[in-house]
Structure formats: C-alpha cells, structure tokens
Image (cartoon, rainbow, N blue to C red):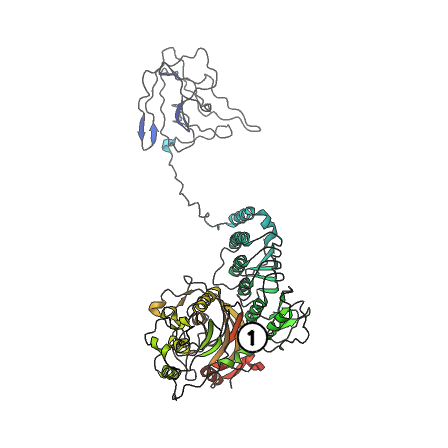
Amino acid sequence: MLCNSATGVKKVVPKTAPVPDTPRAPARQAAVPGLKTSSGVLSFKSVKPVFGAEAKAPKAKAWVRPPVQEEWEEQDEQEEWEEPAQQAPSLKRPVGGAPPTPLFTAPAKPQTQEEVEWVNYDMEDTTVWNQYDDAPDGNVAVEEAENGWYGEVAEPVSKRQKVTPTPRPPSLPPPGMSRDTSSNDENEKAMLAAEHEEWAQRCAIDPARPGQPLRLTILMAEAGLGDADLATWCEWMDRRFAAECPNASAMSSRTRFKASSIDFSENTIGTAGIKALCALLEKHRVRCDILRLTGNCITNDGSRSVLKYLASSSQAAALEVHLSRNKITAEGLKWVLGNLAMHPAYPVWNNDAQRFAPLRLNIENSTAKAQPTFQSIEAACKQFGCTVALGETGSSDMYKTNCAVHLRKWELPAGGMVPSAELHTRPIFAQAGRAAPKPPPSGVTDPVREEPRVVYEDDDLAVILKPAGWSCAPNPADVNPTWSKMKPLARRMQVGELLQQAAAAPLQGWLLLQFGADPNCEVSRDRTMDRGLAHRLDVDTSGPVLVGKTLKGYEHARKQIVAGVLKDYVALVHGTFNTERGECCAPVDSSAFAETMCVKVGEAGQPATTVWEAVAEYESPDRSEKYTLVHCRMVTLRTHQIRAHFQHLGHPLVGDEIYGTGEVPDWCPRIFSHKFRIGFFNAKNQACVETCSLQSVPDLWKALGSLRKVGGMAMMGCGAPGL
C-alpha cells in the first residue's frame, strides 16, 4: 500500500504476517499511471490492480504505521505490492468503556475486482489518511488518533476546507497581552555579570522602592586597577548601568543610582583613569555618601575631573571625599576650594540636624599639611571669598555660608587663621577691586562703552574684563596692525576712539593697543591667533575672558578651555521659581547658528548642563512684574547655553531680544547677563580664580538697584542692591 511520509510517497509493507493462501497481485510492468503534479499537490487516479479469478472476497484493509526509514523495495526493477492480512483490525475496548463500534462493514457479495482510488492530499498536512472502500454509507476515511485508538469518522480531505492560519510577527505579543521583556533584560544582566565575575561580586546593583534611585555598591579597593584596567571597568559598568535604566532620558536631571560608598582605594589610578571614572559617574547620575580614592596616583589634573563630577549637579554628588596619599599639591587643594566655593550644592543641607554642613574632605598627606601649604590656603580663602572648617567636629550653620569644605584631621597651626564664614552669595555683590571701572582717556567726555580692564596678568597669560559693547569676533576689519607701533599717548587716544564709536568695538583692537608694543607679547600682534583670545563672549554680555600674551601662554590657554575652566554667571530672569536651586540638562543644537544666529533645545543637540540657584527675588516698582536673580554654574560650555536653557525653563533673561519677550525694559540697558568668576591653572600649574562682582559693571548694578527686593538671600544682608 502507499502512504504519505515526511520524505514523500512510499510503499508500506505491513508488519502483520501474511496468510499463506493469500494470492499475490501480479507485478506491474510500468510505473503507476496517472501520476500528476499540480500546484505542489500529488494525485494518484484510477489505480486498478486486477486480481485473478481465484481471488477471494476483499477483506477490510487496516492501516499499519510504516517502519522508520523504510524505503521502496525493488526486485528486478519490478515494484511489489503487498496486501494486508486477511484478519480485520482488532479494536480493543478501552478500560471501563463500551465495545467499540465497527468503522465499516465488508461487502456481503464477493468481488473479483477491487477499485482503489487515492484522494488528493496536501503535502503540508501532517494527517495520514487511509484508503477507503465502497460501503453502503459512502466513502469513509479513517484517521488514527495519537493514542493508538481510532478516532471519529471524518470527511475525506478533498471535501474539507483548508484553513490557513494568519502568520503573526514573532516580535508582537498575542492580542490583549503586553510584551514581556523582563526575561530578556535579566538575561542581558546575567551575561554582563558573567563577563567579569570578580568585578560583579564587588559591584552590585539592587532594586529600590518606586520613585527612588537604584541602590549601588562599588567596592573596588585593592583590585590592582591601573588606568587601562579602570577604562575596561568603566566600559563594562557603562553597559550595566544602561541595562538597568534602558529608558533613561539625557534631558533628565534625576539621580538614577545611589551608593553609600564608592571605594577605589589602594590602586594605581592616574589622571586618565580618574577622568574616565568621573565621566561615567556623571553620565549615569550616580550619587554617593562617601567617595574613597585614597592611595592612588591622582595629580592636580586628576583633581579637576573629581571636581567636575562633584560640581555636575545641583545636588551634592558626594558628602565625603577621601584623597589622602595621592599626588595632589597645595595648588590642587586650592582648586578644590575655588570650585566648591559658590557652588549651589555646597554646603549641603542636613535634614537630621536642620543645618548646612560642608563637604568633608580627607587629604592628610604631610606635603599638603606643611606650613607654607596652609598659608597658601589661607590666602586662597581670602581671594576666593570662602573659608574652611578644620578639625574633626567641623562646622554647621542654619544659614548657607561660604564654608563649603571641611578639612578633616587638620589643625590650625600656630599663628594661622582662616577667614570667618559669610553668607554664601556675598562675593556676587562684593567690592569690584581690580575689576573696578577706570576713567576714560583724556578728551573723552561721553563714552559709549567702558574700557576693558586687566584683572590678572603674568608673563604668559592675562584675564581681561570685557564690558558690554565689545565684540570678540575673529578677524575684525577695523583693526590696524600699525597700532602696536604707536607712542603711548597715541595709543590712549586710539582707545578713546574705540570707546566712542557707535558700532561694537573689536576687543582684538584693544588687546593690540594694550600688549602689542611689548616685544615679548608676539601673539597680541598675530591676527591668525585672534591676538590671544582663547574664548569668546557675546557682545552684550560682560565678564572676564582668558587671553594668551605669548605663544606658550596662548597654547596653554587653549588647553585650559578644552580641559574645562570654572565659569560662574549671574543673570536676571522673568518670573519666580518653585525651588531654590536646580539644573537644566537639555541638549543645545547650534547647527544652524551661522544662518539664524540662535540655537535651539532638542535631542539632536550637544549635551549641555547648567546648574542654577535663586539668589534674590525682585519686583518692578509698580509690582506688575516679578524677577529672579540667579547664579549659574556652567558644567558645559555651549553657544548661548544660559539663554537657551532659561527660555526652555520658561524664564527668559531680562533684555534678551532673541530668546526672550523681544522687548528691553527701560530700566535695563542690555541683556542682564554677567560672568563674574573664572578659574584655571596658569602655565606654572598654579590655581587661579578671579572674581568680577556685579559692582564691576555699573549698568547692571544700577538696573538691579531700581527694583524692589522681595525675597531670597538678598534679604539676609548679603549686600544686594534694590529698593
């Protein structure tokens, strides 16, 4: 008999032993007639083997499961056909059931000829159908059930309507059910942990309550990590952080991971390694109570990366930092003080004590505790407008002061003293000092703008306070190279002309007049190097800029800009805030700045972060408008970053015609934006932080004084102007 199988149509030899008297069908001399192929379906029609006259009446034929891998048997190129046994199939009674009903009844009248027809069947159908006989009830097809029992009578395949299931994309869940990706996420986390099993045991990420950051544990002390190993660890941990927070938005400032301790003590981490580590912690918004970096190879350059991480948010990134037994000198410690001073996050409010507490800093190597070191710290506190706490107890206050650092295990040496604590915002409104305006040259009675001032200078670098109305554009056309050869009196007269011209005056022209006559200041005469300008400010924005006087100084200044300089701004914005401080992490897109002269906030932009703190609240004399004076710490340096960010927050800067309301108030002569602090390392690796308070720009000081003070730290005696 023929049967459908996985490999095609096969001849089946039943395993039941044949009866000796059963006649055999004559061997066929030709192939099976009627073999056709139509649309992938094989059909066997009118196969009528004729038996001899001595043939007995046909018996019921039982379907027998073919043996596995049984092939066609050929003898002398003749196909042999076998009849099943004479005995009818034995239908056993199920346990506890009724006797089975016969599936069909053999014909009462013997036949000498049997007609066998094979029905059409679909090659994709896995159901095996038996041949059928002519019976009183018609054509009957028998299907064998999987449990060995004969099933119910079914229609022939040719009469059944084939139902093709609708394919479903494997990535989509069934209707009414959500896709479950938790198992995939867990598998990914397990695979990441298996990459470095030892590191995975030291670094654990545990779930937290809804709305709270994930709990983090990093214990990599004495792990033998150098810069290369730490770079590999950071790449691995970056993928782990991303797997834990796959939907984290770059525009969100929310803390994602919180650790009680991050410990990398007693390794050999240098500048490159600590830079990679701090960049990772800043990227994934990791906060910790204690950051342990004791016993490494961190230098002053490495301390810049640590401070960048600590100052990257309006929330304190760490409450205690251990930097003992590294290579940080007294200048590096001064850089720490200068960066944490005036930062919105420090000192930190302690909910338990209901007081502000400074950052606890452990830096107890003998080199930094020498008497000259303490004297330099004492001088730095006076220059930066901050102070420090000494000893184990430290200090705390109900008001936010300028004491941002607590030097633990430090004692006051004989004859030494540190400045007393003052209000946190006092340096913004302090005396102008070296940045104070100076009188115009003789003969200039009504200048349009103020003259720039030198607030810092050494052999290679200078810091220039740029007033409003001076342009930092490259290659100005109205600068004459021969100005450097003028006599001193002629140069002063040329400065007077720059102060009185209606158009924005080129700052490069003033630099040429100021330093061009000095033979050592060759960069001041070089137009291709912007005459020493290392960075720029908007025409209507005032503040200090870093300038290189020599080739060595210019190259060093450019490197400082790339490494990151300290920049603090003060601005007056429309409206009031619901919180005292915050941050904006919206990317800034400046791709169309050359055509539109403005930037926009969007996901396609570059990462940008501005940390801000509300200093004082003001209102107009007629009480119709409210304003807020904010202090901004620039974590990144993007074009028009502050202006675009505060427009994004819904509080545009006062007087901003591009990003604001388009109107400049009568009491404010220009956009209210002033950079009042800049910090860097000079060519001798000395930390420098220069302050230009609001009193150094009389136009903004006068504008603020015309408003009424109504709230904020300005009401606490910090020296803020106002009615």
On the image, the x and y values in percent for residue 388 come to 62, 72
Q: How many marks?
A: 1
On the image, the x and y values in percent for residue 683 come to 50, 68
Residue 229 higher or lower than 166, as above or below: below
Classify residue 210 by image quadrant.
bottom right
Disc 1 target residue: 384
On the image, the x and y values in percent for residue 535 come to 43, 70
- In the picture, measured across the screen, residue 15 lies left or right of residue 496, that is right
Residue beneath the point at 36% across and 31% down: 158
Considering depth in this image, is 134 or 1 the residue closer to the camera? 1
Q: Is residue 479 visible?
A: no
Residue beneath the point at 58% across and 47% down: 197
On the image, the x and y values in percent for residue 23 come to 40, 12
Q: Is residue 272 visible?
A: yes
How crowded pointer 1 is (Cα within 10 Å; few <14, some 14-19, many 20+) is rated as many
- Name the image quarter holding the N terminus: top left
Classify residue 259 by image quadrant.
bottom right
**What amino acid is labelled 1 in the image?**
Phe
Furthest toward the front, the residue is: 519
Considering depth in this image, is 346 or 23 the residue closer to the camera? 346
Q: Secondary structure at mark 1?
A: helix
